[in-house]
Image (cartoon, rainbow, N blue to C red):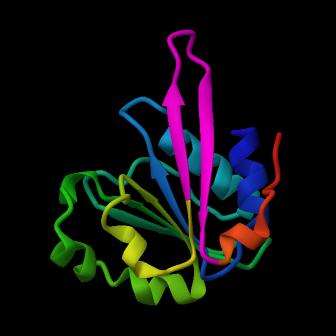
Amino acid sequence: MAFGRSLGASLRAGDLVLLAGPLGAGKTTLTRGIADGLGVGGRVSSPTFVLARVHAAGAAGVPLVHVDAYRLGGDLAQLDDLDLDTDLERSALVVEWGEGSAERLSEDYLVVRMERRDDDVREVTLEPHGSWASRMPLPTV
């Protein structure tokens, strides 16, 4: 949560963040932290069955669009149907399971790769692409 808050506080409209990792790695929990850092309203839960949730802008003035692409199985047509490129212009976009499909929404994106160790500690690796490379280092906790 603390890392998510820190990352969320640094996000701005047009930012694309892809969360990668196995089930149980903490992708939705990280997104809750990002939402908190952005100050957006509403309960953040996994959008697995609705595919995408929009959280209204809060203190930072940037809405959050939270997508779970797991059920899409890489189906780019369904991803296009969500019209995420339009949302990306005015929102921060966080996509769980989006690696391999959602990166085409922007050449500027950050992959947050998460692993859950046997001792329940999460390890995070950041992979910046495009303009994200010049924004590094990102806030850390």
Judge whether residue 43 can be spotted in this image. no
Q: Nearer the viewer, residue 69 or 41?
A: 69
Prevailing secondary structure class for the magenta stretch in the rendered image: strand
**In the depicted view, which residue is nearer to us: 70 or 124?**
124
Q: How many marks?
A: 0
The answer to whether residue 104 of the structure is visible from this angle is yes
Locate residue 58 relative to residue 94 in the image: left or right.
Answer: right
69 sits left or right of 119 in the view: left
In magenta, the rendered stretch is 111-130
- As for residue 47 lying within the magenta part, the answer is no
Quarter of the image for residue 128 reads bottom right
Q: Quadrant of the N terminus?
A: top right
Q: Percent x, y for residue 134?
A: 76, 72
Q: In the figure, residue 51 lies in which quadrant? A: bottom left
Q: Residue at 77%, 62% (x, y): give it.
A: 136
Identify the image quadrant of the C terminus.
top right
Q: Tell which of 58 and 10 is nearer to you.
A: 10
- Along the viewing direction, whichever of 117 and 23 lies nearer the viewer: 117
Q: Which residue is rendered at x = 48% and y = 81% of the image?
A: 106
Q: Is residue 43 above or below residue 56?
A: above
Coordinates of residue 41 in the picture (x, y in percent): 63, 63
Q: Residue at x 44, y 90 (%)?
A: 86
Instruction: Please tell me whether residue 114 belongs to the stretch shown in magenta.
Output: yes
Residue 115: percent from the left, percent from the top? 50, 31
Q: Residue 27: x, y in percent?
A: 49, 43
Q: Is residue 111 left or right of residue 121?
A: left
Q: Is residue 99 above or below residue 85?
A: above
The residue under the point 56% across, 40% down is 29
In the rendered image, the vertical position of residue 86 relative to residue 53, given as above or below: below
- Left or right position of 46 against 114: left
Up the image or down, 60 lies above or below 100; here it is below
